Amino acid sequence: MKTIHNSRLYDQYIQSRQIRQMFTGELPRFLLLHYAPGELLTNPFSPSGYLQLVVDGDLLLYDMPDESSTVSLQTAFHNVNILGDMELLGVPFTPLFVEAKTDVYTLALYLEQHRQRLLADPAFLRYLCVSMAEKLNGAVQASSQMTLRQKVSRSLRFAEPGQRISGIKAIADSLNVSSRQLMRVLKEFCEQGVLEHEKKGSYRVLKKPEI
């Protein structure tokens, strides 16, 4: 992990990820952190002490007893992801590792320094509640027996029209399926007008899939 001192990049993330809308009044001053692929953002045995807003990059989540249960969380399919929310609320133990799958950037606040302000900020608490509800919904769906098509459809509901999807092999690996199986499902979505196949291994989102 490295602290990045780049005001231009900092301002870019604040604006592009609409961070100001998440807070009431004056915006807190964040640290801009960078994690290289393979680095851990959270570790149950060594709490980071930060509340982190993931503004760029993809993550891998896995539990302690079995790393084969890895779940890929691609931030391109989500809003800003919050790490450290349970710690903010006083839950001392988070039984998950969160690892950088790609280069990851976060905006971070020291929990102890900002805890009272965060818990008194209605705009942030609203965002926190929505974020935790989405996490809970995702956990419930992930624990159920879903088909590959259902998993892809769930992810595409978070995508915006015009967004591009690539890295098919990496996505297939995270889903524990072959690239051929994944491409077959993506072809179905192309036939339904949800996706457009632009070139080998690259798709563009046209619309959200029907539930």
Image (tube, rainbow, N blue to C red):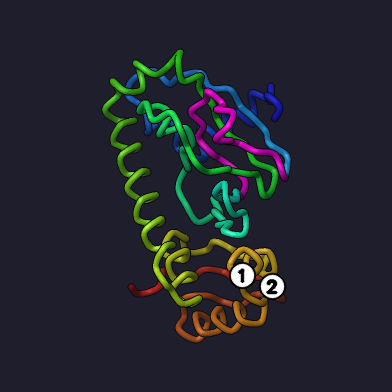
Q: Where is residue 176 in the image (x, y as percent from the top left)?
A: 61, 70
Query: Which amino acid is tagged 1?
Result: Asn
Task: Classify mark 1: helix, strand or loop.
Answer: loop
Seen at 72% across and 44% down, the residue is 38
Give the image location of residue 141, x and y in percent. Answer: 38, 63
- Left or right of 50 in this view: 202: right
Counting other residues with Cα less than 10 Å from the Cα at mark 1, is it few (<14), some (14-19), or many (20 or more)? some
Residue found at x 37% / y 32%: 22
In the image, which disc is placed on residue 176?
Answer: 1
Q: In which quarter of the image is the C terminus?
A: bottom left
- Residues marked 1 and 2 touching at CB (< 8 Å): no
Question: Where does label 2 land, which residue?
Answer: 201
Left or right of residue 200, residue 111 in this image: left
The x and y percentages for residue 18 are 45, 37
Q: Which of 137 and 55 is in front in this view?
A: 137
Q: Nearer the viewer, residue 156 or 21?
A: 156
All told, the count of numbered labels is 2
Residue at image location 39% in from the left, 49% down from the top: 135
> Could you tell me the amino acid type at mark 2?
Gly
Residue lying furthest front: 65
Camera-nearest label, 1 or 2:
1
